[in-house]
Amino acid sequence: MHNKWLFIILLFLSTYLSRFIGLETMARRKMNPTLHLYFSYVPVAIISALLVTQVLTTTNGQTVISFPVLIGCLATAILIKFLKMFLPSVVLGVAIGLLARYFL
């Protein structure tokens, strides 16, 4: 039990310190426009990778599409487009995904 907490604390410290040091060193420098363009695409790439791993799941050694997750993702994207509010769109998208999971 103690090893798990020690591991969590060490991961927290290493993550926090690496981000703090990175922010402190990068805040004082003028960033190259090419590097700035590269870093602007990182959040989109990470979110895309997370969504693909959730939508495409493995069952019995075969890759299948999780339709409830896909429906929830699409509903969230459409709601964000029209409502222009993040949190209500995500909450409604999760609810729609849960309903799709229950009825599919």
Image: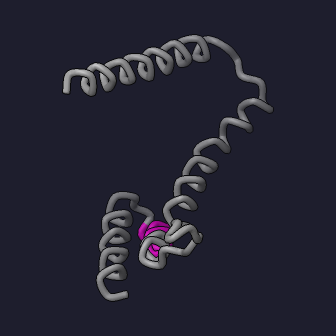
Indicate left or right for 12 with 47 as reference.
Answer: left
Query: Where on the picture, by quarter, is residue 104?
Result: bottom left
Whether residue 65 is situated above or below residue 47 in the rendered picture? below
79 is within the stretch colored magenta: yes
Residue 83 position, x and y percent, is 41, 69
Indicate left or right for 91 with 75 as reference.
Answer: left
Quadrant where the N terminus sits is top left
Indicate left or right for 23 with 90 as reference.
Answer: right
Q: How many marks?
A: 0
Query: Is 99 in front, or is 36?
Result: 99
* Stretch in magenta: 74-83
Residue 70 position, x and y percent, is 49, 73
Is residue 82 something one can see in this rendering?
no
Which residue is painted at 58% across and 71% down in the image? 62
Query: Is 33 in front, or is 17?
Result: 17
Is residue 59 something one can see in this rendering?
yes
Q: Residue furthest bottom?
A: 103
Residue 6 position, x and y percent, is 28, 19
Residue 92 position, x and y percent, is 32, 71
Which residue is painted at 44% across and 69% down in the image? 76
Query: Is 103 in front, or is 78?
Result: 103
